[in-house]
Amino acid sequence: MDAVEQLDVVLRPSRTVGGWSSPRGVDTSCLPWRLWDKAKRLAWDPATIDLGADAEHWAALPLAYQDAMLHVCTGFLVGEEAVTLDIVPLALAVADEGRLEEAMYLTSFAFEEAKHLEFFRRWLTAVGADLDGYYERLAAQAADLGLHYDPAQSVGMWESALPSSMRRVLVDRSPAAMLDASVTYNQFVEGCLAISGYTLWADLFALLDAFPGMQQGIRHIRADEGRHITYGTYLCQRILAEHPDLLEGATARLRELAAFWFEVSPTIDDPNDPVSTQLSQDFTRRVHDQVERRIAVLGRATTMTVADLERTGAAEAAERELLGID
């Protein structure tokens, strides 16, 4: 496909006067519609969460624990900004495929990612976090450990890997491209990185017994992300059920993304910072565990039909098993 043909994919979707889906009805039994319906019922507003107690707890928190929380919080903040910006190509691709229910759900998906960004930014402002000081300490720690830290770096999960995979589907609607986008966004970024990150929040909450506002926000965010990853599992399973030959590439991609993440963001091993070291090592272990568990889930889809996936609720069952939430 040359450049003109690629541009034509984006600028001239195949639509006709008699081709609209909604006059013929929508499929309220399919998974994307059920996720859409749940997103409406479980909507929440970051602005309504009281962060007053969190500000008091933050002021009393030793610097080492502040830095540990900022490490996790800024990781989520930047990650949420990236996924907010990069979900749009997937929504456009499924819309152009005529998948109305999926396109509808992805509008709520994008809205929720933006809310997550808002919540973390509101929290940092409310507690008075000094991010400039934190980034200075982070750069000094990296230098002491012989690690590379460059704010101008343009190679990373958020800076290159995720946007390139997602933007590919603007001009390449092949099953392989769609699967790569969902494996990168839903399976690795959300299913491995974010889910492992929630366990770090749980560890911090158990250790500090504080920050009720952050705890409330994380409960909402985790419920939202459970729906997002369930959709991603559904999308990957649907593609793999129709194209089982793509499983090997999807498996390799997940492991490649994990290797890339830890190459760019190495596990912390700093004897002078035992809190961050423990959190970082736990995170690394959990990410690798999630990668292998998700590979197993994707593999099962190659033995099923698309109708079987819908009938059995395979994606929902898989995510209940992997995440422990509904």
Image (cartoon, grey):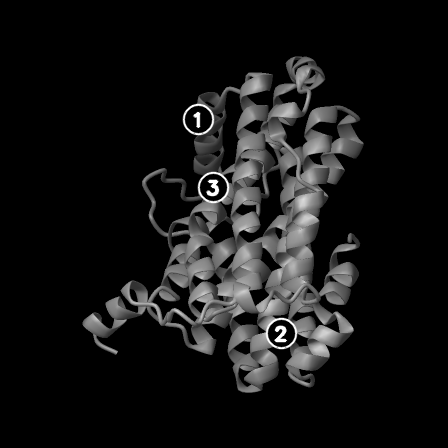
Relative placement, left or right, of 113 versus 18 is right
* Residue type highlighted by circle 2: Gln
* Residue type highlighted by circle 1: Glu
The foreground one among 299 and 275 is 299
- The CA span between labels 1 and 2 is 44 Å
Disc 2 crowd rating (10 Å Cα; few below 14, some 14-19, many 20+) is many
The foreground one among 48 and 73 is 48
* Residue type highlighted by circle 3: Glu
Residue beneath disc 1: 136
Asked if disc 1 and disc 2 are in contact, CB closer than 8 Å, the reply is no
Considering the numbered disc 3 on the image, is that residue within a helix, a strand or a loop? helix
Considering the numbered disc 2 on the image, is that residue within a helix, a strand or a loop? helix
Relative placement, left or right, of 308 versus 183 is right
Residue at image coords 74%, 25%: 212
Give the label on residue 237, or none. Answer: 2
Considering the numbered disc 1 on the image, is that residue within a helix, a strand or a loop? helix
Residue at image coords 72%, 34%: 204
Residue at image coords 79%, 54%: 324
Quarter placement of the N terminus: bottom left
Asked if disc 3 and disc 2 are in contact, CB closer than 8 Å, the reply is no
Residue beneath disc 3: 81
Indicate the position of residue 89 as horizontal and vertical percent values. Answer: 41, 58
Residue at image coords 67%, 84%: 305
Disc 1 crowd rating (10 Å Cα; few below 14, some 14-19, many 20+) is few
Give the label on residue 87, or none. Answer: none
Mark with earlier residue (1, 2): 1
Tally of numbered discs: 3
- The CA span between labels 3 and 2 is 27 Å
Disc 3 crowd rating (10 Å Cα; few below 14, some 14-19, many 20+) is some
- The CA span between labels 3 and 1 is 22 Å
From this viewpoint, is residue 287 visible? no
